[in-house]
Image (cartoon, grey):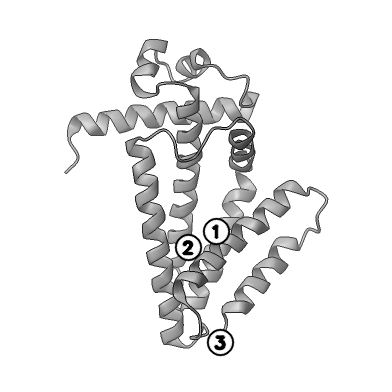
Amino acid sequence: MVSRKEKERIFREDLIIDAATKLFKKNGFDSATMEDIAKEADYTKPTLYKYFKNREEILLAVYLQGWQDSLDMLYAAMEEVETGIEKLEWAADAYFKFFSENVIYFDLLRYMYSNNIKLDAPESDRKKNYENRRKQIREDFGKVIKLGMDDGTICDEFDVKIAVEYYFSNLYITMHKKYSSPDIDTDFVEKSKKMILRTFRK
């Protein structure tokens, strides 16, 4: 059971992350200082440092929050349909919708890499939660693929673990291509989705 103190900490961190995200969207990643973020969150700068050691930790937390929000959309979408292949299709649609509407996370990812801000540092509860959920989503989508194999909508010749990695890798590649090529065909994402699903269909 989460203690009251822990709930308060999470609540305050989330307020800071929301404030930072708002500033990053408005002014870019370089412009928003710790002082700016504290002011936007209605905290003092010393209070901000109680929760995040530096701006890099906030950048990482913003990225991880976006990743978590995208997963919530994927899971919600899959609840709406029954078969394995339908769940893969609806999850793909949710993924593309989320990142099309929240390009900031691709901007942030590029910014972090160009400034050598690593996704595997620093160690924190938020990072551990990310690792745990990353593992869980692989297991959950493995179950979706097995479901599709059992209900006859997904080819049963796949290695499930490889199939999961293929699925997510291609979702990411599709969105990254769209993000990095603004003049790309308007139906590129839909065509890519059909190709991905065609691989899985029985």
Q: Amino acid at mark 3?
A: Lys
Quarter of the rendering occupied by the C terminus? bottom right
Instruction: Give the CA separation, mark 2 to mark 3.
Output: 22 Å
- Of mark 3 and mark 1, the one earlier in the sequence is 1
The structure residue drawn at horizontal position 38% and vertical position 17%, both measured from the top left corner, is 49
**Residue 27 can be seen, yes or no:** yes
User: Does 105 sit left or right of 132 as displayed?
Assistant: right
Q: Which mark is residue 94?
A: 1
The residue wearing badge 2 is 77
Mark 2 element type? helix
The residue wearing badge 3 is 202
Percent x, y for residue 115? 61, 30
Percent x, y for residue 76? 43, 60
Nearer the observer: mark 3 or 1; the answer is: 3
**Dot 3 crowding, Cα within 10 Å, few <14, some 14–19, many 20+:** some
Seen in the picture, residue 38 relative to 185 is either above or below; the reply is above
Instruction: Give the CA separation, mark 1 to mark 2.
Output: 7 Å
